[in-house]
Amino acid sequence: MDCLGLFILLMLQCFQWTTAPAAEEVSWTYTGLVGQSEWSQYFPDCGGTSQSPVDVVTTQTKYDPSLIPLTPLGYSQHGNKPFTMYNNGHTAVIELPDWMGLGGLPWLFTAVQMHLHWGSGGPSHGGGEHTINGLSADAELHVVHYNSELYPNMSTAMTQSDGLAVLGVLIVTGEETNPAFNNILNYLSRIRHADQKVSIPAFDIQSLLPKDLGRYYRYNGSLTTPPCYQSVMWTLFNERIQISKAQLLKMETILYSSKANDPDRMLLQDNYRATQPINHRVAFASFSAESGKELSSGEVTAIVIGVMCGCVGLAVIIRFIVKTIRFFTLLHRESVVVNRMKEPEKEKEKKQDMALNPTSEAEKKEEPSPSPQTEP
Ligand SMILES: *[C@@H]1O[C@H](CO)[C@@H](O)[C@H](O)[C@H]1NC(C)=O
Ligand SMILES: *[C@@H]1O[C@H](CO)[C@@H](O)[C@H](O)[C@H]1NC(C)=O
């Protein structure tokens, strides 16, 4: 190869380096050099105006009665084929079979994968991505689906505004072990390092979801990791699910974001993004604040007393009205008697009127009435 050829080749290489979207190559993190506040320099969508997660301020949500309960399709029909779970350096991802999907949305959505976000400080130290009235959960589960009615696959759908539907489940810490979560947690020790992969026994994915699938928040947002495409129809369930403290600690401390051959081990922790401005967006609620709320005994007492007071008040008002009517009826009778005595005078006045205007009645009758139009 001559010098000119080499030169041109080099120039082409240079050209590629400067113009190629290196974004996919950038290894982003949650803190540090390519931490979340720097994401938008490498992934422009991360600086968009419809980003996720958000803080759902319940008093600013809008009740939308058309938001019907979601129906997980095939979540419980897992069959015998194992699921694949892997550590991608950012989270643990479980690939989902394509017969799983979501009903109750404007299009049919097909399941792709689910993953988790968590913190590092144990219970009540954050880890969830979405917050409700500023309150953080300890972790969050995302079940990702793509619009299989409009798009052929996940990679095409993820860049479209109506491409994805993600279920967000807030996870908090309680006393009891959540057996459904052990279907995942029991196998994390097999994928401690980034890029490791394991087959896990199939299990009922619906058992990870809250029982109440009818009460949720809906808003338009984005992927919560680079490239942050604004393609997600979010469903954030109102009901939180519980796992035990031991389960949370396992999730927080077992995985590494570094690869197996990397001498510097980096724990995979605090893989949650800060809440993003809601901007022009409205978060809709499938339920109104009052409906279905369970009443405490105090509230029941208050309502009973309120109703009784209302009844007594109503009785008093009715009694007052009846009395008032009676009073005016009496008054009217008296005035009728008085008027009767004045009657003869009135008759006299009328007769005088007639005498002055003898033609008035007759003229009125003569007034021409508009004759019905006839068709030519
Ligand atoms: C997704 O579909 C598009 C369009 O049909 C196709 O070009 C692309 O190769 C597909 N991607 C995958 C990962 O299957
Ligand atoms: C999301 O965006 C689409 C298209 O702009 C709009 O029709 C829909 O009502 C939005 N949904 C919500 C929940 O805001």
Image: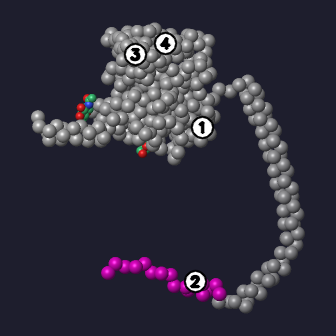
Nearest to the observer: residue 203 or residue 368: 203
The residue pinned by badge 2 equals: 365
**Span of residues in magenta:** 360-376
Q: Earlier in the sequence, mark 4 or mark 3?
A: 4
Which callout, 1 or 3, points to the residue nearer the camera? 3
Report the Cα–Cα distance between label 4 and label 3: 16 Å
**Residue 137 x/y as whole percent:** 57, 25
Q: Secondary structure at mark 2?
A: helix
Q: Quadrant of residue 314?
A: top right
> Label 2 neighbourhood size at 10 Å, few (<14), some (14-19), many (20+)?
few
| Residue at screen point 60% across, 37% down | 58
The residue pinned by badge 4 equals: 254
The residue pinned by badge 1 equals: 57
Q: What quarter of the picture does the N terminus occupy?
A: top left
Disc 2 CB within 8 Å of nearest ligand 2 atom: no
Under mark 1, the amino acid is Val
